[in-house]
Amino acid sequence: MNKSLYQFANNLVDSAKDLAPIVLVVAFFQIVVLQQPIPNIDNIIIGTGSVLIGLTLFMHGLKLGLFPIGEVLAFSFVKKGSIAWLLIFSFALGFGATIAEPDLIVMANEAAKVAQFGGIITSDTQLTQYAQTLRYTVAIAVGLSVVIGVIKILKGWAIQYLIIGGYVLVMISTLLAPDFIIGIAYDAGGVTTGPITVPLLTALGVGLSSSIRARNPLIDGFGMIAIASLLPIVAIMIFGIVQ
Amino acid sequence: MTSLIQHFVQTFWAVVPIVVILFVFQVGILKQKIPHLKRIIIGFILVWLGLTFLIIGLEKALFPLGKIMATQLTSSDLVSNPLDWYSYYWVYIFAGCIGFATTIAEPSLLAVAIKANQVSGGFIKIKALRITVAIGVAIGIALGSFRIVTGLPLHYFIIGGYILVLIQTYFSPKSIVALAYDAGGVTTSIVTVPIIAALGLGLSSAIDGRNPLTDGFGLIAFASLFPIMSVLAYVQIIHLSNHDKPNQ
């Protein structure tokens, strides 16, 4: 009990450290440059407290539950030796982790509000649906990225060719996609890789490349996050074209 | 109150897929028991509660804060001529400061930096790499704000950036390329994304002639792309300076 309390306190300090730079920079600009009152300051203080508590509970919960079982599973599927199961598991892991990413939830909600404001969607039911479709599109793309990343490690492909291919796909889809989706699509690439996805994907990548003799875990274990930042861009562009 | 329940429902369905996937694969396919079941269930409940508070807080505090900063920094007290892009210099300075400060404190970046140090046999210094990435993010977000102010098309910058990354890749040591690409993905943390996104949306609605729908997004893309360039440039520079030494 003491040990978990200590861990909890540690997570609280980490969350405060995450928030501190933003609070400091904003406070500096408010006091030195702007010298204006912040509207709704009480709401912002309550909200910041909520972020602090939420982030602490979230990270603590991840370390208690999700990371241990996720990492053990990743290693078990690597050892199992069945490539088909490994690929199915990889897709599921990438998909499931992305659906739970907080950044993506917030961004998708905001993108839906902007789309409503811009007249792309009209009713409130469509609002939720739009946000959800965005998230599922991104999650499928991350799932596929993990599959590609695993095949890359198995075959020993060089990352730069995959990235060049990804860039070409992004460029082509940019030409075809409607204007309103391009910004959201590019941003989706940066949003996908958050606190749940990164540790789980790294565990899978490093576990896999250390179990294959010809692979160097430090070199071949990386690059999965980069692929997972590119395919969602293409997927959202396709969503925009189809819509 | 209804919005609180809505948030709990939304985050519940966000956590369900990963829970189902992990349990099905562990029990159904591997046919193994779940170790420390009680602890893991508590963990998932904490994830659910934490996610709910986190999202409520982000939407209540950090998003509005980003928008307020955008409105105040573009007010007529600070911007002497709204038609000149350089009158918005406080916007660029704020964007750069937020980018630098949040990145330098980012824990997942520290993890990547330590690994880069190992891969390169100590050539890449941990602190130097973190500063390099933070400068990349700062320049990226400042340039992204410039793009919103001027209304130039986003894809010119992103595709231009891709081409530059490809040229840099060609001249970089291959062992470090994957790490440099990954560095772009880890820069934007949970608390950074909302405030940067809100800054972009706020700027695009505060400045005449801009539209949040077409101009508001894109700052996060800048924050993910520019660190790749700055890391590749840094690797390039230390690589070259090592070649110049006669005893190497």
Image (spheres, coloured by chain):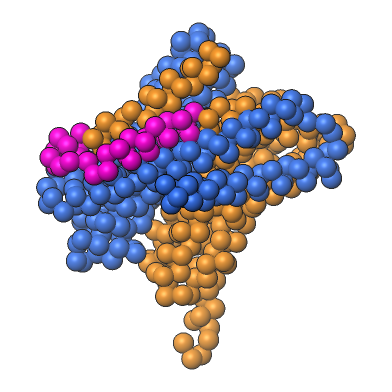
Chain colours: A blue, B orange
Q: Is residue A169 visible?
A: no
Q: Is residue B181 above or below residue B176?
A: above
Q: Pick the quarter of the image with the N terminus of chain B.
A: top right
Q: Tell me where residue A130 sits by quadrant.
A: top left
Q: Residue at x 76, y 43 (%)?
A: A27
Q: Position of residue B138 (x, y in %)?
A: 64, 51
The residue positioned 46% from the left and 87% from the top of the image is B248
Question: Which portion, as a residue range, is magenta?
Answer: B24-52
Residue in the image at 50% along x and 10% along y: A124
Q: Is residue A216 above or below residue B63?
A: below
How many numbered marks does the figure carry?
0
Direction from residue A186 to residue B212 in the image, left or right: right
Please name whichever residue, A188 or A12, is drawn nearer the observer in this view of the structure: A12
Q: Would residue A174 be counted in the magenta stretch?
A: no
Tell which residue pokes out farthest to the bottom in this image. Answer: B247
The image quarter containing residue A79 is bottom left
Q: Is residue A80 visible?
A: yes
Secondary structure mostly taken by the magenta-highlighted segment of the chain: helix
| Coordinates of residue B209 in the picture (x, y in percent) | 71, 25
Please tell me which residue is depicted at 51% across the width and 24% down the height of the picture: A109
Q: x and y percent of residue A5 in the render? A: 47, 47
- Residue B18 in picture, x, y percent from top left: 31, 34
